[in-house]
């Protein structure tokens, strides 16, 4: 049971949970959060792939990929949340 | 007997999965976000265990920190707009047309298929794949930096990183286009605890941020992590209304957003010529150029993330802005 | 020191700098936007000349070479896509000058140009890149800029559609990222050259499947098309022309590229792709028949046409792949031009008569004859009637399918054509019917300068059919596996 | 005189380039529009004359333009093409005069004349096309150009007719696309060559060749109004008179018949078609259409519908002539292509005059119209008698040759068929003439035909075409008569 196997399975589990949440959740905020879980799961799998037995240093390329993935994910989340806020404002003004 | 670290890994993995399930199934939105933030920090810890400090730092600072703050702000906006600020639990606004069961089942099937595909791809992957880390190691001396991840990010695959900063710029332009107006809600009453915290923490955060940027050349750190930490300063200032964005500041703000991208692109182009191609830093100046780029990009990322948190273009009422939260 | 810049670098950096300057100076945005587009078109023409003269052009960024660094490569197909993007983009921008000139559209005018130029940067980046991770970052640039454009109008329907689009595009990007990660973990290479000739092991097939599902979400292929109609129908006219005409093409181009380099694992996977395409053709057609609004009908016709492009892709089975990409490329070019023209024309018609409900198109005495004529010309290319480029694309599709004996793809194309005739004739009936109009019908009003751009696009869609032979030979320049050097 | 190699292209471009100009003209520029129309029509007739002179001197015209690797857009001017162009050019000139008069104050004239010249461009293109691929291009263009004309009036009924018309013709176009693709995949080329290109291929897989024959003839049969696909023709009669006259009597219907001729003679070759055993069922189908069309015509009270059903049966004479696979029958078929065009256009224009001038639309209202509009009715009578097949007129000539061809091909039933159809023609034409000449007009009060108010532009064209019917019939053996020209064509097709 080396760490990469444990965390690899964790990554897949988290991705699966995130995917189910993203597709089946009704609430907008919950769907954004579920997608963020998926991205963390994806990060897990790539970091696990880069892991080497301790004496060897891990492969830096997947690390760069995951960092880029995180930055891209945060900008996408920011835009999605801005859309949600704007929709909430419009829906609230329509109801009032 | 099994080595203690393996038990720690198992426990951590279980905690992470449990938190993921909990955050999606809990009904109250606020506790959902708090659970998510804990989940993010634990997964950053897991990545430290997988000897990926850079990624752990990025996940903690950007993936969980900034995203958590954005989620909380959106929740606050939801409650403020729907007037349920006072209520104990803010339940999610269920959409008017509930999705029929058939589609949810189809989605579930689709998710199962994808996860299965993932499992096959993961288990099939050879343990130590033939990555080109060997090539990276051998080319490191010409890259002007010692830390391989920064080398990959800012030299070998600098084009990717430039486009990544462009993604951030696109995000802030889109957010400014979606939302506009001034926020004139009263400043929250911040007791002495905050004053004390601010006097001590803010300068420390700035120092930590710049250190992270500087150490990036040799050790885990770099532009994105440093930028995110500096953005935390911006977030705190915005939260406490120490700084309220004014329409007049828009020019400076736009300049700051584009600064990182423009500088990076200009450096990338100006080095071309005299037998060199774009992005090919001359060997002797490589380190200084990379640090210049990193510095400017860090500043730009900090301001952009803060603006993303603020979430709207500060437009006066006259120009069609609205005043609410 | 002199700075020699290759046209490829210009094609990507000019729109980037244009976007930055347009964002910094909102009042001058339109001027900067058009100027940048003109320069980018110049760079693309210079690149096309270079490719014509010397075949495929490669530029190793940072001087590191393929596995370590990222290469930019321009061959016939990529230059054709670049030319499509800059030509259609330039004409849509001219049309945007008119359709966004309203007094209340100050904000839209200011924000249209930086978002559109960032979109152009992303697309030019996709067409020139040879590195699959670089493609991921480029798709994200396109996705964010496209969502920004979708919600430009600020209406509640547009925001809701933009949010759905955002969800689908984030999920698609995640699947694509994971697929790319796994391909790297198995092959150790991220660039196209490194991936070609890899043995299709189970894991690699799974990784490719993930990439394909991600791209299917991005191109709105049939079962994953739910987000496209609302997003394209509720955007402003120039925005929906860009979205439908150009943005969808980037992900389609990537599918084409991957099919060229990566081994397509098995025949039945290809048939599955064809079936999804066939589903899109039929479902898109049926939904278009039921669409209430003109722009919704045009958006559903996009879903159908994308399905047709995937059918063209799968028409001759696995061994036909070295030829099928050309039929798909022709259809992509034809759809790009014709759909942009149609959306602009639909936008013009909506501006002139105030609404775009298909049933009441004939109740109003105002008849924008030139816009309706443009819509009809674009429909001719989309239906695939001669001599349009759409016809040549369908001819190539059916010819390959017949030669390989796959008659079902020919049947699907036939059904698709008949459905498209059916839903477009609903609109024509609205144009040409006069007996339900109360006021006298004025002739020839509604001829505005704004009709010039859509008309040019529509005439291009029809005229390019005659230039199919040189176009095809241009597409083959620098093709990695095929006949040309 | 130098033989301009690009002459066919000029003829095609005269009407293709006229269309955008006519579209762009504002409504009130009537004078300019008429000038352009008449100028173009006259120019086209002159060019066609010059082309036919050249072709008769043996000059070969062959324009190729590669659209896809191995697939060309090919224009050629062989004698068969000349025959069809001459017919459409002359009749287009006459009908343009007629439609200028007919649409004096109507709405949307710019749009009408734009699509009108597009139609003729398509017809000329169909005639000049050198291979099935080019033929397909113009075949579809013809459909697209005629649809707006059919629904020109913009009423709900016109749109219903337009939809049915579009369904039939576009479905035909799609099936033709399928056939052309099959030919291209099976034979490697779609070029027309006298004597056919499928001789060897038909020998190998007979079934594929037969299937291809059925697909191609079925597709062309839609426009040639063969029985199962004829329903659109009477329904499309809702279009204004000039459209019914030129298009549905001449351009569209003849395009189908012309296409069948090209396919049978120059794609399959008459011997191969016979070897495949396809000519007999085609002849039978044509026969059925002839009889069915005539019977339906008898019961039609609406004048234009009756003429439409008569066209359905008359066009099948041409298909019958082609299917009889004998040179003499072929001469009869080709001659009928011209003669039927002349006669039918006269009758449609006369019907248009009756509707326009006297408001007479139904056969039952035709009492005493002869005295009210003597010129138009004289032309109508001449054409009707020609249709029935009275000796000195053109109709008799083509029927005579068809009968001879039937004898030559040993198909004696053809003679019975021709006699029977002539009888049926008489049954539905003679009552109309009887009402017109021998019934006195109903008293002034109700529904009587009032003072005729049609200008010379409406009266002259039917009379001219009637004279042409007389001339084509009387001087059949003159050097440049249509009959002479058909013998010249058949000689090439049958390579005696």
Image: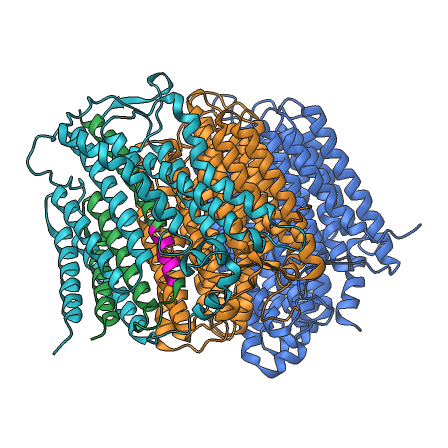
Chain colours: A green, B cyan, C orange, D blue
* Residue D309, position as x, y percentages in the image: 53, 50
View extreme (top): residue: B318
Compared with D435, D180 (above or below) is: below
Q: Residue at x 67, y 78 (%)?
A: D199
Q: Residue at x 62, y 38 (%)?
A: C38
C84, C37: nearer the viewer: C37
Q: Residue at x 23, y 70 (%)?
A: A3
- The answer to whether residue D177 of the structure is visible from this angle is no
Using residue D400 as the reference point, say whether residue C222 is left or right of it: left
* Residue C429, position as x, y percentages in the image: 45, 39
View extreme (bottom): residue: D204
Which quarter of the picture shows residue D371?
top right
C35, A10: nearer the viewer: A10
Using residue D467 as the reference point, say whether residue C273 is left or right of it: left
Which quarter of the picture shows residue D71?
bottom right
Using residue D171 as the reference point, say whether residue D1 is left or right of it: right
* Residue C305, position as x, y percentages in the image: 45, 53
Q: Residue at x 43, y 31 (%)?
A: B254
> Total label count?
0
* Residue C276, position as x, y percentages in the image: 37, 62
Which quarter of the picture shows residue C450?
top right
D362, D93: nearer the viewer: D93
Give the dominant element type of the magenta stretch: helix, strand or loop.
Answer: helix
Residue B13 among magenta residues:
no
Using residue A17 as the reference point, say whether residue C62 is left or right of it: right
Compared with B171, C435 (above or below) is: above
Q: Residues in magenta? A: A62-70
Q: Quadrant of the N terminus of chain C?
A: top right
């Amino acid at each position: 049971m080396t760490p990469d196997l444990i965390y690899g399975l964790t990554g897949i589990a988290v991705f699966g949970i995130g995917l189910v949440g993203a597709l089946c959740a009704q609430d907008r905020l919950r769907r954004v959060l579920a997608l963020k879980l998926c991205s963390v799961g994806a990060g897990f799998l790539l970091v696990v792939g880069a892991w080497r037995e301790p004496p060897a240093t891990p492969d830096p390329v997947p690390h760069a990929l995951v960092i880029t993935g995180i930055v891209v994910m945060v900008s996408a989340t920011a835009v999605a949340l801005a859309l949600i806020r704007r929709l909430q404002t419009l829906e609230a003004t329509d109801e009032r | 007997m099994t080595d203690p670290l393996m038990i720690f890994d198992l426990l951590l993995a279980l905690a992470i999965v449990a938190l993921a399930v909990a955050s999606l199934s809990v009904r109250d939105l606020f506790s959902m976000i708090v659970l998510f933030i804990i989940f993010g920090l634990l997964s950053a810890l897991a990545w430290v265990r997988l000897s990926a400090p850079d990624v752990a730092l990025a996940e903690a600072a950007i993936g969980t920190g900034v995203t958590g703050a954005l989620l909380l702000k959106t929740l606050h906006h939801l409650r403020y707009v729907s007037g349920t600020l006072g209520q104990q639990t803010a339940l999610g606004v269920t959409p008017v047309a509930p999705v029929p069961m058939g589609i949810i089942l189809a989605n579930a099937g689709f998710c199962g298929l994808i996860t299965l595909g993932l499992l096959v791809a993961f288990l099939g992957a050879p343990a130590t794949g033939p990555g080109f880390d060997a090539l990276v190691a051998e080319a490191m001396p010409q890259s002007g930096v010692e830390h391989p991840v920064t080398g990959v990010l800012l030299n070998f695959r600098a084009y990717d990183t430039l486009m990544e900063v462009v993604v951030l710029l696109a995000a802030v332009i889109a957010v400014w286009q979606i939302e506009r107006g001034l926020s004139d809600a009263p400043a929250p009453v911040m007791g002495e605890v905050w004053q004390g915290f601010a006097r001590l923490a803010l300068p420390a955060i700035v120092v930590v941020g710049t250190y992270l940027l500087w150490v990036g050349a040799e050790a885990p750190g770099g532009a994105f992590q440093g930028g995110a930490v500096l953005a935390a300063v911006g977030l705190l200032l915005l939260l406490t209304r120490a700084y309220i964005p004014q329409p007049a500041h828009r020019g400076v703000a736009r300049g700051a957003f584009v600064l990182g991208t423009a500088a990076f692109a200009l450096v990338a182009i100006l080095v071309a010529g005299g037998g060199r191609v774009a992005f090919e830093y001359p060997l002797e100046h490589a380190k200084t150029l990379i640090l210049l780029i990193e510095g400017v990009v860090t500043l730009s990322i900090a301001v952009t993330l803060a603006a993303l948190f603020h979430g709207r273009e500060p437009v006066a009422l006259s120009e069609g802005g609205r005043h609410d939260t | 020191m002199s700075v020699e810049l290759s046209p490829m670098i210009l094609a990507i950096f000019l729109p980037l700098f244009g976007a930055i300057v347009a964002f910094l100076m909102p009042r001058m945005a339109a001027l900067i936007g058009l100027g940048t587009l003109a320069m980018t078109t110049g760079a693309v023409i210079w690149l096309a000349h270079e490719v014509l003269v010397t075949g495929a052009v490669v530029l190793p960024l940072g001087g590191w070479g393929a596995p370590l660094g990222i290469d930019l490569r321009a061959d016939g197909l990529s230059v054709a896509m670049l030319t499509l993007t800059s030509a259609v983009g330039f004409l849509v921008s001219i049309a945007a000058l008119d359709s966004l000139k309203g007094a209340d559209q100050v904000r839209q005018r200011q924000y249209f140009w930086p978002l559109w130029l960032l979109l152009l940067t992303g697309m030019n980046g996709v067409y020139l890149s040879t590195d699959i991770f670089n493609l991921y970052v480029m798709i994200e640039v396109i996705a964010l800029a496209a969502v920004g454009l979708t919600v430009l109008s600020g209406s509640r329907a547009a925001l809701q559609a933009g949010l759905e689009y955002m969800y689908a595009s984030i999920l698609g990007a995640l699947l694509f990222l994971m697929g790319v990660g796994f391909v790297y973990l198995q092959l150790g290479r991220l660039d196209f050259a490194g991936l070609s000739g890899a043995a299709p092991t189970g894991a690699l097939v799974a990784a490719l499947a993930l990439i394909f599902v991600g791209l299917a979400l991005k191109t709105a292929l049939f079962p994953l098309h739910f987000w496209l109609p609302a997003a394209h129908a509720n955007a402003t006219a120039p925005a929906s022309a860009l979205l439908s005409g150009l943005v969808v093409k980037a992900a389609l181009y990537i599918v084409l590229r991957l099919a060229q380099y990566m081994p397509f694992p098995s025949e039945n996977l290809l048939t599955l792709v064809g079936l999804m395409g066939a589903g899109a053709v039929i479902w898109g057609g049926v939904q278009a028949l039921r669409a209430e609004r003109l722009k919704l009908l045009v958006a559903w016709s996009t879903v159908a046409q994308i399905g047709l492009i995937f059918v063209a892709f799968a028409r001759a089975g696995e061994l036909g792949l070295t030829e099928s990409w050309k039929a798909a490329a022709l259809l992509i070019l034809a759809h790009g031009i014709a759909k942009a023209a149609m959306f602009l024309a639909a936008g013009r018609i909506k501006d002139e008569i105030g609404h775009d409900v298909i049933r009441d198109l004939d109740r109003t005495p105002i008849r924008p004859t030139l816009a309706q004529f443009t819509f009809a010309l674009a429909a001719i290319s989309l239906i695939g009637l001669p001599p349009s480029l759409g016809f040549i694309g369908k001819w190539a599709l059916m010819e390959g399918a017949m030669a390989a004996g796959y008659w079902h793809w020919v049947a699907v194309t036939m059904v698709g054509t008949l459905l498209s005739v059916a839903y477009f004739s609903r609109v024509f009936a609205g144009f040409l019917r006069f007996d339900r109009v109360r006021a006298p019908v004025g002739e020839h009003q509604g001829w505005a300068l704004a009709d010039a751009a859509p008309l040019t696009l529509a005439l291009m869609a029809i005229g390019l059919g005659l230039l199919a032979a040189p176009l095809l030979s241009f597409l083959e320049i620098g093709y990695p596996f095929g006949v040309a050097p | 005189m130098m033989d301009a190699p690009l002459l066919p292209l000029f003829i095609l471009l005269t009407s293709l380039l006229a269309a955008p100009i006519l579209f762009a003209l504002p409504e009130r520029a009537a004078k300019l529009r008429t000038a352009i129309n008449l100028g173009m029509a006259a120019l086209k007739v002159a060019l066609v004359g010059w082309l036919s002179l050249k072709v008769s001197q043996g000059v070969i015209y062959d324009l190729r333009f590669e659209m896809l690797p191995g697939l060309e857009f090919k224009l050629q001017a062989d004698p068969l093409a000349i025959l069809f162009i001459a017919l459409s050019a002359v009749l287009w000139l006459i009908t343009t005069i007629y439609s200028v008069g007919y649409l004096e104050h109507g709405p949307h004239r710019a749009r009408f004349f734009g699509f009108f010249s597009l139609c003729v461009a398509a017809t000329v293109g169909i005639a000049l096309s050198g291979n099935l691929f080019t033929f397909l291009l113009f075949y579809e263009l013809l459909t697209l150009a005629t649809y707006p004309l059919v629904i020109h009036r913009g009423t709900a009924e016109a749109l219903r007719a337009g939809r049915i018309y579009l369904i039939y013709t576009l479905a035909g176009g799609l099936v033709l696309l399928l056939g052309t693709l099959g030919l291209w995949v099976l034979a490697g080329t779609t070029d027309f060559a006298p004597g056919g290109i499928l001789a060897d291929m038909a020998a190998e897989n007979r079934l594929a060749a037969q299937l291809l024959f059925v697909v191609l003839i079925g597709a062309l049969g839609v426009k040639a109004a063969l029985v199962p696909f004829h329903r659109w023709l009477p329904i499309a009669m809702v279009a204004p008179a000039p459209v019914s006259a030129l298009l549905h009597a001449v351009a569209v219907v003849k395009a189908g018949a012309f296409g069948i001729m090209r396919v049978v003679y120059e794609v399959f070759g008459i011997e191969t078609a016979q070897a495949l055993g396809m000519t007999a069922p085609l002849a039978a189908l044509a026969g059925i259409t002839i009889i069915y069309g005539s019977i339906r015509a008898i019961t039609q009270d609406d004048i234009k519908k009756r003429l439409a059903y008569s066209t359905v049966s008359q066009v099948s004479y041409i298909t019958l002539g082609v299917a009889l696979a004998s040179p003499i029958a072929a001469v009869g078929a080709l001659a009928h292509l011209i003669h039927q065009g002349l006669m039918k256009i006269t009758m449609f224009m006369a019907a248009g005059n009756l509707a326009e001038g006297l408001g007479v639309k139904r056969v039952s209202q035709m009492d005493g119209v002869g005295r009210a509009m003597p010129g138009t009715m004289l032309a109508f009578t001449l054409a009707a008698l020609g249709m029935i097949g009275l000796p000195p007129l053109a109709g008799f000539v083509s029927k005579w040759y068809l009968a001879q061809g039937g004898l030559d091909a040993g198909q004696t039933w053809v003679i019975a068929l021709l006699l029977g159809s002539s009888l049926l023609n008489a049954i539905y034409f003679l009552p109309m003439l009887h009402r017109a000449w021998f019934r006195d007009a109903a008293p002034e009060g109700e529904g009587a035909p009032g003072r005729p108010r049609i200008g010379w532009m409406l009266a002259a064209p039917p009379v001219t075409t009637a004279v042409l019917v007389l001339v084509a019939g009387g001087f059949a053996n003159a050097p440049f008569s249509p009959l002479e020209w058909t013998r010249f064509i058949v000689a090439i097709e049958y390579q005696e």
